[in-house]
Amino acid sequence: MDEKIEFIANGLSIEGMISRGTGTKGVVITHPHPQYGGDMYNPVVESIGHVYQQKGLTTLRFNFRGVGRSEGSYGNGIDEQEDVLAAVACLKELKAILSKNIM
């Protein structure tokens, strides 16, 4: 089941959706170009997430800065790289917390 989350990328609040998997692996899923209507609710993004979830992976999809409820504005593809790095860090942190709670 998807849960709304927020994480910080370069001081900006980024909106995301996480679905906790049964295994130890996870994946960050990004959406199509934000200047052409891409967001984390894109049907392809949701389908990719669903397939990974069926495989037991934790998925994190998010809206790049300036999309949906994510703060900031489009950064010409450069600032968005920071969003991806922050999403990966968020997922790693969550997976570490979950693995400690299981043991």
Image: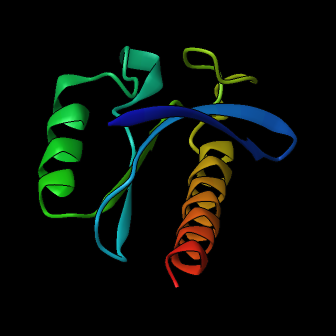
Residue at image x 38%, y 34%? 2
Q: Quadrant of residue 97?
A: bottom right
Q: Quadrant of the N terminus?
A: top left
Residue at figure coordinates x 63%, y 16% from the top left: 69
In the displayed structure, 13 sits above or below 89; it is: above
In this view, the residue in front, 58 or 45, is 58
What is the image's colouring?
Answer: rainbow
- Percent position of residue 82, x then y: 67, 53
Labels in figure, total: 0
Where residue 75 sits: x, y (%)? 67, 34
Residue 80: quarter of image: top right
Residue extending furthest right? Answer: 11
Residue 74 drawn above or below residue 88: above
In the image, taking residue 33 as reference, residue 16 lies left or right, namely right
Residue 36 as seen in the image, left or right of residue 46:
right
- Residue lying furthest bottom: 103
Query: Which of 39 and 46 lies nearest the eye of the viewer?
Result: 46
Residue at 55% x, 63% y: name it. Answer: 88
Q: Can you give x and y, in whole percent of width and height, for residue 102 in the image? A: 49, 76
Q: Which residue: 23% across, 33% down?
A: 46
Q: Does 65 sit above or below residue 66? A: below
Tell me residue 93's x, y (percent): 64, 68
Q: Is residue 5 above or below residue 78?
A: above
Q: Is residue 32 left or right of residue 5?
A: left
